[in-house]
Amino acid sequence: MIRADYLVATVPLTKQAEAMLPLMQGYWLPDPKPFSLYGYRGYRSGKIFIGTNSERVLIQATGSIAHDVALRMPLPVDHELSVARIDVQVTMVVQDADFFIRACEPSKAYKSVIWEAIGEPGCTLYVGAPKSDCRLRIYNKSAESGIKPLSPGDYLRVEIQFRNRYADRMFRAIRARAPRLPFLSHLRRMIDSYSFDCVKRYVEQEDEELFPDDEVKDVDEISRRKAWIERSVIPAIRKVLAADPDYRDILLSMLDNPTDEML
């Protein structure tokens, strides 16, 4: 499964975006703490930051939650969304991750470097300059995390860092549930055909083994929804009932007898 692993995006601070802030904060920031980032002031909880400056709203997410944010982030002004960076990865199981990395041949069109600790597992291959709009990193995820797959072998992570216009395009591909084509298209240009085919086959198989941290746990989802209800929905309901007490019966009826659209 191709997943976002890091995201930095901004939208204009319109009235509509400002109205959505409490909903986003209530859903993704169950334990918010004041924080500043890149000149934006806001709140951080876990691996998510949501903040504002005088003109824009910024969301930064790191790790598995970045994919959830990319899919669910409300877009009040879609054409003015700016994605500064998005990292997209697939984590596959191979017999020997370091052997795979050493055997991988990067395209000569890109500046490349391989990093390897002497006497220890843990190779990393970089293809592309650090400041380029598209940079590939292939590394031994088992050596980095200390986690081995259930099946014999190692976790190998193939990750592409997109910036600027490439980031915008990849973000929209993820929103459309169609990240495979742009991810593989970039990967094909950056490594040899054999290594590429290995990754492509893994991406296309249906029974792949996800790295444990790649999947947001259900308990996290429930916790976020509870926090959202308690911090955003309940205060909104109280305001409505203060203005229209008779709406209470309608609300209770909707809770007791939800329609198909509400489920």
Image (spheres, rainbow, N blue to C red):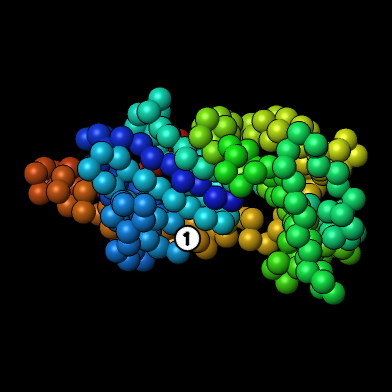
Q: Is residue 250 above or below residue 228?
A: above
Residue drawn at the location 31% of the way across and 52% of the way down: 39
Q: Helix, strand, or loop for circle 1?
A: loop
- Residue 78 visible at all: yes
Residue drawn at the location 43% of the way across and 42% of the way down: 9
Extreme residue in the left direction? 243
Q: Is residue 11 left or right of residue 246?
A: right
Residue 42 vs residue 174, the one in the foreground: 42
Residue 95 at x, y percent in the picture: 90, 59
Q: Is residue 10 above or below residue 22?
A: above
- Residue 30 visible at all: no
Amino acid type at circle 1 is: Lys
Residue drawn at the location 37% of the way across and 61% of the way down: 44
Residue 192 vs residue 254, the one in the foreground: 192
Q: Which residue is mark 1?
A: 47
Q: Quadrant of the N terminus?
A: top right
Q: Is residue 185 left or right of residue 21?
A: right
Residue 49 at x, y percent in the picture: 39, 55
Residue 107 at x, y percent in the picture: 80, 37
> Dividing the picture into quarters, in which one does residue 251 lie?
top left
Extreme residue in the bottom direction? 119
Extreme residue in the top direction? 79
Residue drawn at the location 52% of the way across and 63% of the way down: 219
Q: Quadrant of the C terminus?
A: top left
Residue 81 at x, y percent in the picture: 41, 32
